[in-house]
């Protein structure tokens, strides 16, 4: 029994490892890794994850740490949307809602970095990370737009434009 479980975990490890190496083979991809989303929004236990994340976010008072947390939440939501779209058919509205909420977290991260900059805190590393993340989000949204059902294409296009605006704001902050 232990050998069977070990073999299954070993196969999963190699399967996941081979997928990530394939994803990095495209030279046009942005070098920014989206985190594994964990529970997906269609899980009956997802509300527990959402509550935990709200509590953790509430307890973070440092604006740069809050921005980092919000960016991770945005990345996880985007990746959760990708997982839902690729694995679960008939979840288009949930996909769109999940990704849209993720971009709200991205916007909040940007606002927290602006707040930190007003306080005189060095925000350059955070802004560089936000810039890279914005590029990755646009890349993923463009890919989703290309392969999504017709009813989601416009939504992904609008989200991509929204993230492009975030990137412009980040670049303005970097240059000031």
Image: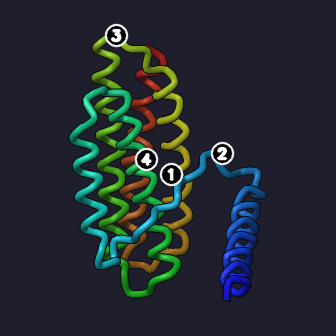
Q: Nearer the viewer, mark 2 or mark 1?
A: 2
Q: Within 10 angstroms of label 2, few (less than 14), some, or many (20 or more) residues?
A: few
Residue 23 lies left or right of residue 167; in this view the side is: right
- Provide residue 105's location: percent of width, then percent of height: 32, 47
Q: Earlier in the sequence, mark 1 or mark 3?
A: 3
Residue at 43% from the left image edge and 33% from the top image edge: 168
Q: Residue furthest front?
A: 2
Mark 4, residue position: 72
**Circle 3 SS class:** loop
Q: Within 10 angstroms of label 4, few (less than 14), some, or many (20 or more) residues?
A: many
Q: Earlier in the sequence, mark 3 or mark 4?
A: 4
- Provide residue 101's location: percent of width, then percent of height: 30, 57
Quadrant position of the N terminus in the picture: bottom right
Residue at 75% from the left image edge and 64% from the top image edge: 22
Query: What mark, if any, has residue 120 been given in the picture?
Result: 3
Mark 2, residue position: 31
Q: Earlier in the sequence, mark 2 or mark 1?
A: 2
Q: Quadrant of residue 46?
A: bottom left
Marks 3 and 4, Cα distance to the nearest angstrom? 24 Å
Residue at 27% from the left image edge and 55% from the top image edge: 52
Q: Residue furthest top?
A: 120
Marks 1 and 3, Cα distance to the nearest angstrom? 30 Å
- Provide residue 98's location: percent of width, then percent of height: 34, 64
Mark 1, residue position: 138
Q: Earlier in the sequence, mark 4 or mark 2?
A: 2
Q: Earlier in the sequence, mark 2 or mark 3?
A: 2
Q: Quadrant of residue 176?
A: top left
Marks 4 and 2, Cα distance to the nearest angstrom? 16 Å
């Amino acid at each position: 029994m232990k050998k069977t479980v070990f073999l299954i975990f070993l196969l999963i490890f190699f399967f996941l490892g081979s997928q990530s190496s394939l994803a990095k083979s495209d030279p046009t991809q942005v070098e920014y890794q989206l985190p594994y989303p964990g529970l997906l929004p269609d899980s009956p236990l997802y509300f527990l994850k959402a509550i935990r994340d709200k509590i953790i976010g509430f307890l973070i008072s440092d604006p740069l740490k809050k921005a980092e947390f919000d960016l991770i939440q945005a990345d996880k939501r985007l990746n959760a949307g990708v997982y839902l779209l690729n694995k679960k058919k008939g979840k288009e509205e949930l996909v769109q809602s999940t990704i849209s909420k993720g971009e709200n977290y991205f916007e909040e991260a940007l606002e927290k970095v602006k707040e930190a900059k007003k306080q005189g805190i060095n925000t350059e590393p955070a802004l560089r990370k936000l810039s890279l993340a914005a590029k990755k989000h646009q890349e993923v949204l463009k890919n989703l737009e290309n392969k999504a059902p017709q009813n989601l294409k416009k939504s992904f296009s609008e989200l991509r434009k929204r993230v492009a605006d975030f990137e412009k704001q980040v670049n303005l902050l970097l240059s000031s």
